[in-house]
Image (tube, grey):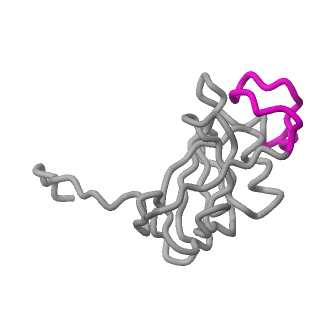
Amino acid sequence: MPVPDAPVTGAHPDQPEPPGGSQWPSRLDPEIAGRLRRTPDGLVAAVVRQHDSGEVLMMAWMDDEALHRTLTTGRATYWSRSRREYWVKGATSGHHQYVRSVALDCDGDAVLVSVDQVGAACHTGQRTCFFTELPVTGQVTP
C-alpha cells in the first residue's frame, strides 16, 4: 500500500499559514517572486516531469516558500491544500524527487520541475499520476 509523503514545516516556528496570508517575509528571490502570477490563495501550479525522458509524473501546488525550498535544497517541496502544510516528496514514502531544473512558464503562473524520480510519483503507487486514459472521439488531421 502506498505511503503518503510527510509534511515538512521546519522553516518557521509556527504551523504554516495558508499561502497568500503569510505572517513571515518570503525567502524567495524577489526577482523570481515578482514574476509569479499566483492564484487568489497564493499558489502556482507545479508540473513535474522526469528530467531525462520528459515523462509527465504529477502536478502539485507551490507557494513562494515551497518554491524557495525546492530551489535551495534540490528536493521537491509542495504546499498541500488539503492538509494546509508543506511536504517534501518522498520524506516518508521513499519516493524522492531530486530536482534537476525548474523553469517558469511564459505567463508566470506555472513552473516545470524536472526531477530524478525514485519510485512512484503518484500516491496510488503508480509511476505517474496520469495513468487514466480518456477516450478521444474527435480526430483532427494536421
**16 magenta-colored:** yes
Residue depicted at x 15% and y 53%: 135
Above/below status of 122 relative to 31 = below
**Number of marks drawn:** 0
Q: Which quarter of the figure is the N terminus placed in?
A: bottom left
Drawn side of residue 30 relative to residue 44, left or right: right
**20 magenta-colored:** yes
Residue depicted at x 54% and y 55%: 4
Write down the quadrant of residue 118 in the picture. bottom right
Residue depicted at x 41% and y 59%: 124
Where residue 19 sits: x, y (%)? 70, 29
Along the viewing direction, whichever of 96 and 100 lies nearer the viewer? 96
Which residues are drawn in magenta? Answer: 11-32
Drawn side of residue 44 relative to residue 59, left or right: right
Where residue 68 sits: x, y (%)? 79, 48
Magenta stretch: dominant secondary structure:
loop
Residue extending farthest to the front is 1
Query: Is residue 107 in view?
Result: no
